[in-house]
Image (cartoon, grey):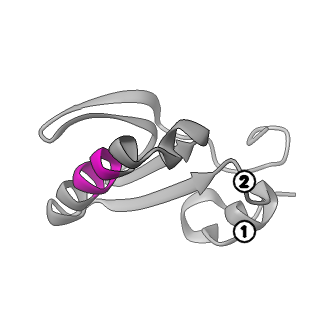
Amino acid sequence: MLAEEGYRLPNDAQKAIPDPRGVVDFFYEPNVSVFWNGAVHDKPDQAAQDRQLRSQLLGQGHRVIALRYDQDLQEQLARYPEVLGKGN
């Protein structure tokens, strides 16, 4: 969808981060971590793990973007033109 709509593609997908240990859905160099949150991320235990990982990434100088399954994707993408471009 990103390619079809003319958005900037990530440099990496499903990128394993060793410290803090986790997986970033999309990674944009040099330090932007994008997470695509499905319904499982609404569960309290998963939400707590997400907050911890994202807090640690922020502490290491990463920019963290979380996209949600239950919100309009186009509107969410439009919030980050400096990372994703403006699309078509």
Left or right, 32 with reference to 83: left
Residue 50 vs residue 79, the one in the foreground: 50
Residue 87 vs residue 77, the one in the foreground: 77
Q: Residue at x 30, y 51 (%)?
A: 48
Helix, strand, or loop for circle 2?
loop
Mark 1 Cα shell of 10 Å, populated few (<14), some (14-19), many (≥20): some
Helix, strand, or loop for circle 1?
helix
In the image, is residue 53 part of the stretch drawn in magenta? yes
Q: Relative to residue 71, is residue 14 depicted above or below?
A: above
Q: Quadrant of the N terminus?
A: top right
Q: Quadrant of the C terminus?
A: bottom right
Q: Residue at x 76, y 38 (%)?
A: 3
Q: Amino acid at mark 1?
A: Ala
Q: Which x, y percent locates residue 25?
A: 47, 36
Asked which quadrant contains residue 46, the reply is top left
Q: Which x, y percent locates residue 37?
A: 55, 45
Residue bearing the label numbered 1: 78
Q: Which x, y percent locates residue 50?
A: 34, 48
Left or right, 15 with reference to 34: left
Q: Residue at x 69, y 64 (%)?
A: 76
Q: Amino acid at mark 2?
A: Asp
Disc assigned to residue 70: 2
Is residue 30 visible to us here? no
Q: What segment is highlighted magenta in the picture? A: 48-54
Residue 25 vs residue 85, the one in the foreground: 25
